[in-house]
Image (tube, helix red, strand yellow):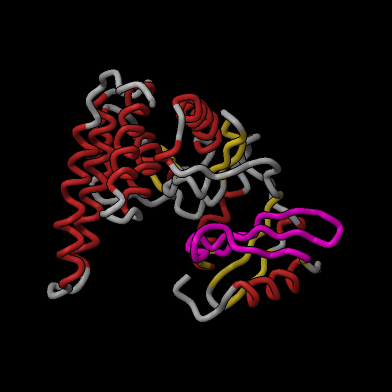
Amino acid sequence: MHSSFGADEVRCAAEDAFGVEFAVFKPLGAGNSSRNFHAVTAGGDEYFIKVANADRTRRISAYLAKLSSPLIPGLAFGGKRGHIGRYEITAFAWVRGGYNIAPHHLTKLQIAAILEGYETLSEAFSAVDAGLLEKWSGADAAAAAAGLPLRPIHGDFHFRNYFLRGDKLIACCDFECMRLGIATEDLARIFIHAMERTHFWHLPYQIALHRNFARMVAMSRYPESAWRAAVDQYISYKSERRRAKRANDFFARVEGLLRAPLYAAFRRRCAKKTPPAQA
């Protein structure tokens, strides 16, 4: 979380803000890097607790209330919010039976469910005023290359932020990174996010990620140009991030050299052809 507080301090702040005591309060994700928690009261009521940058949360509060979909958990405790440092704590209804699954483990049926569910989410996103949202540099060019309109997208659509139950997408959370973009940026991020966090020596995981990305491309309704534009946008964004770091940042240069071939491999997978059958 890049902060000086831990789960116990978040728990205390959440209990004070919401006026409850939690019997269970545990982080979701390794090292709590996603800043999400599963909380359970003594009475068995379950909540999804989200810790987010307060400035960003205030900026998006104007459109969060507009997001209405069966796939978006409702705010709990009447929308009360807590605070800890420069972060804001929000509670949502817990998604019963939902689970996260890493993209290298996705089956074809689950990929189909994500594609179908994302179309439903896109309808909810369309209610957001585009004038409230930022966009990455080059977004207009990416949209033109993709042949798709710029529209509100999730902006952080990775496997920790959506929930599956069987072969159905049942919920999505964490909308603080919403921005203007193209739909394939969200869908490609499922795999790019995982690739960026997979150790280089886990070669089978990398192979599986690229295989399942090819499956999603082949199964989607979006043209090849839209997928290439999405990957190119991420490559451009990462290059800008590296340039923004100090020129003598040795690790930034090494990261760029090591990751570049993997991004290029995703781009090659954008060709719509039938992917190999799942083992």
Q: Residue furthest top?
A: 274
Name the spot of residue 206 as percent of width and height, x first. Answer: 30, 44
Q: Residue at 49% of width from left, 31% of height from top?
A: 114
Q: Is residue 109 left or right of residue 254?
A: right
Outermost residue on the front side: it is 279
* Quarter where residue 183 is shown: top left
Q: Measured from the top left, where is residue 6 in percent x and y?
A: 57, 75
User: In x, y percent, where is residue 56?
Assistant: 49, 62
Residue 106 against residue 112 in the figure, above or below: below
The one of 271 and 85 positioned closer to us in this rendering: 271
Whether 147 is among the magenta residues is no
* Residue at left offset 24%, top offset 38%: 266
The percent coordinates of residue 115 (x first, y second) are: 46, 28
* Residue situated furthest bottom in the rendering: 4
* Residue 26 inside the magenta-drawn segment: yes
In this rendered view, identify the residue nearer to me: 106 or 18.
Answer: 106
Q: Nearer the viewer, residue 208 or 216?
A: 208
- Name the magenta segment's main secondary structure: strand
Q: Which residues, given as a range, are shown in magenta?
A: 23-51
Q: Residue at x 50, y 29 (%)?
A: 110
* Nearer-the-camera pick, 240 or 214: 214
From the viewer's perspective, is residue 11 above or below residue 198?
below
Q: Answer left or right for 140 relative to 52.
A: left
Residue extending farthest to the right is: 43
Residue for point 60% across, 31% down: 166
- In the picture, measured across the screen, residue 168 lies left or right of residue 206, that is right
Q: Quadrant of the C terminus?
A: top left
Q: How many marks?
A: 0
